[in-house]
Amino acid sequence: MAGAKLKGREVVGSDAPVLAMAKGFGRYKPEEEKPVRKVEVSGDELSYLRRRREMLRSMTVEQILQVIEFHKDLNVFQALKLAKKQGKFIVPNYILDRILTETGKRHNAWTGTAVIYETPDKPFAEKVVYSWDDANVQYFVTFEVPQPFRGKTNCILVVEHPDFDIVSLGDNNFQLKAAEGSVSLLERFPKKRGDWYGYDKTFRIPVGRPKQTGDSSRRLWRVNYEYVGLVSLDCRDYGGRRGVDLNYAPSLAFGVALF
């Protein structure tokens, strides 16, 4: 992104404010302390959206393209707000990866797949905190690690929308909240960025040892420290249609698909 200063591949600052380029991220800046909330989807609505998510997985790519809606230039907070307003969910990485690899369609998009990981070789503790700087303002997003996953090393936690939300805690602090029992753990999460790896079949997140480039591999982009955020797919990066980005700050604007 022009004018952005990069630390590795994630935005940590900007000459031309990324918040402005993200079209109004500042409007989501908290101004007062707010209580932590659970995922703000009622039981019936959550069950309904989960069924629709599973239905989408069962469709062919041609059918998927007929029913999902693409929206341009939204940051993560705007995407979550739009999905909630329309009573829809953000299409997960599994689906958007299929579109990229099985058709000639191209998109640069946030996915509805959230991931949480730690610094290589550092075990999960009670929480993971990711921070980023935007227009000389520092922001934080926190995730409280479920008890069964604490102490795990070189793993990644995954949860799909609508089973999560990112809520404001005040003073530029946010928290990723997940519905009970909705978080999955993937072992053997790679420590090295930029290499090609196999991927798990449920979420299509790179795991395991490096392997040759091909249909069964994905190129991983991660940070070398802790991260809490959404998977993005960016056809402009070095992985092309098979690159998986687990490193972008949520104030950046990409497309988003809803269903």
Image (spheres, grey):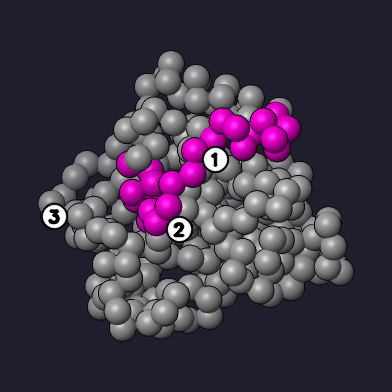
Q: Is residue 80 magenta?
A: yes
Counting from the top left corner in percent of width and height, residue 98 is at 71, 46
Question: Please, what is the three-letter code of the amino acid marked with disc 1?
Answer: Val
Question: 174 or 152, which lies in front?
Answer: 174
Give the alpha-carbon distance from disc 1 to disc 3, as whole Å.
30 Å
Mark 3: secondary structure: loop
Q: In this picture, which residue range is highlighted in magenta?
A: 59-81
Mark 1: secondary structure: loop
Question: Please, what is the three-letter code of the amino acid marked with disc 3?
Answer: Glu
Counting from the top left corner in percent of width and height, residue 49 is at 50, 25
Question: 157 or 103, which lies in front?
Answer: 103
Q: Earlier in the sequence, mark 1 or mark 2?
A: 1
Tag 1: Cα neighbours inside 10 Å, few (<14), some, or many (≥20)? many
Tag 3: Cα neighbours inside 10 Å, few (<14), some, or many (≥20)? few
Q: Is residue 125 magenta?
A: no
State the residue position of label 2. 254
Tag 2: Cα neighbours inside 10 Å, few (<14), some, or many (≥20)? many
State the residue position of label 3. 31
Let me know if residue 119 appears in the view. no
Indicate whether 211 appears above or below 57. Answer: below
Is label 1 or label 3 in front?
Answer: 1
Q: Residue at (29%, 79%) from the top-left corner? A: 16
Asked whether, in this view, residue 73 is left or right of residue 214, the answer is left
State the residue position of label 1. 91
Q: Residue at (64%, 25%) from the top-left corner? A: 55
Counting from the top left corner in percent of width and height, residue 76 is at 40, 53
Task: Kindly give the residue lying farthest to the left in the view shown.
Answer: 32
